[in-house]
Amino acid sequence: LEVLSPGQPVCRLTSEAQKLKQLASYGFSVVVDVPFDAAMSALSADAFLKAVQKMVPFSSLVVGSDVSFGKNREGNKDFLSKFNNEFS
């Protein structure tokens, strides 16, 4: 929210430490915090995923049911399926 709505108060449900502890309890051994700034927020869904994949090469992603990413939230689960077919 600091990037998308500057000046708006940010209310976090969990601290960074709590998130990491919870993820570890589910078996995650590595968590990567990808920097998000104004330039990243302006990328298309395709460019956003390619940028993330360049920073942190991945072969799979874990996302929530309401995932959205890329400029104007154009990326979603359907987009991820297409992305997977193109790049796997």
Image: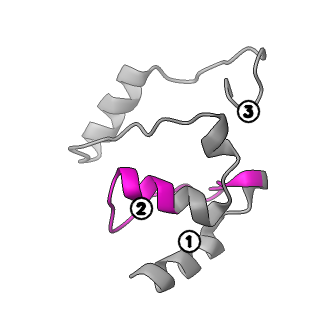
Residue at figure coordinates x 75%, y 21% from the top left: 6
Work out which quarter of the rendered image holds the N terminus and state it: top right
Residue range (magenta): 50-71
Name the amino acid type tagged 1.
Leu
- 23 left or right, relative to 79: left
Q: Earlier in the sequence, mark 1 or mark 3?
A: 3
Queried whether the magenta region covers residue 21, the answer comes back as no
Spatial distance from mark 3 to mark 2, Cα to Cα?
A: 23 Å
| Residue position for label 1 | 80
Amino acid type at mark 3: Leu
Please report the residue visible at 32 percent of the width from the left and 59 percent of the height from the top: 57
Tell me the residue that label 2 is attached to: 61
| Sequence order check, earlier mark of 1 and 2 | 2
Q: Residue at the left extreme?
A: 29
**Proximity of marks 3 and 2: CB atoms separated by less than 8 Å:** no
Quarter of the figure with the C terminus: bottom left
Query: In front: mark 1 or mark 3?
Result: 3
Q: Is residue 87 above or below residue 6?
A: below
Question: In the current view of this chain or complex, which residue is farthest to the bottom?
Answer: 85
**Crowd tier of the residue under label 2, counting other residues whose Cα lies within 10 Å: few below 14, some 14–19, many 20 or above:** few
Query: What secondary structure prevails in the magenta region?
Result: loop
Asked if labels 3 and 1 touch by Cβ distance under 8 angstroms, the answer is: no
Numbered mark located on residue 4 in the image? 3
Indicate left or right for 52 with 80 as reference.
left
